């Protein structure tokens, strides 16, 4: 799921229900500013770095083994 249009309370609820690994920080610019939810450094790293890299990087044969 992408967190582009949701506030910190909604993102917190999604983290609690789905887990932080199911979310990425998105943007609806120029329609809505994708404000950073203030949920701590670990959530920021997951939403902006770890999860998008996992989503967008190609899967290698080694990773499947």
Image (cartoon, grey):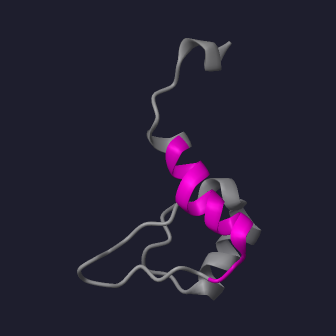
Residue at 50% in and 66% down: 25
Left or right, 49 with respect to 35, comes to right
Toward the left, the furthest residue is: 30
Q: Position of residue 46 (x, y in %)?
A: 64, 58
Most common secondary structure along the magenta stretch: helix
In the rendered structure, the answer to whether residue 15 lies left or right of residue 24 reads: right
Query: Going by the image, does 5 lie left or right of 20?
Result: left
The reply to whether the magenta stretch includes residue 40 is: yes
Quadrant containing the C terminus is top right
Residue 27 percent coordinates (x, y): 37, 71
Q: Nearer the viewer, residue 42 or 18?
A: 42
Indicate the quadrant where residue 18 lies: bottom right
Task: Give the magenta range.
Answer: 38-53
Relative to 63, is 17 above or below? Answer: below
Image point (51%, 25%), residue name: 59
| Residue at position x 70%, y 70% in the image | 41
Residue 17 drawn at (x, y percent): 73, 67
> Which of the 4 quarters of the picture holds residue 7?
bottom right
46 vs 54, left or right, is: right
Above or below, comparing residue 35 to residue 3 in the picture:
below
């Amino acid at each position: 799921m992408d967190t582009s249009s949701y506030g910190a309370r909604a993102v917190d609820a999604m983290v609690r229900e789905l887990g932080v690994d199911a979310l990425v920080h998105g943007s609806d610019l120029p329609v809505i500013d994708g404000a950073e939810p203030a949920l701590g450094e670990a959530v920021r790293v997951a939403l902006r770095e770890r999860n998008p890299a996992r989503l967008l990087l190609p899967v290698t044969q080694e990773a499947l083994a």
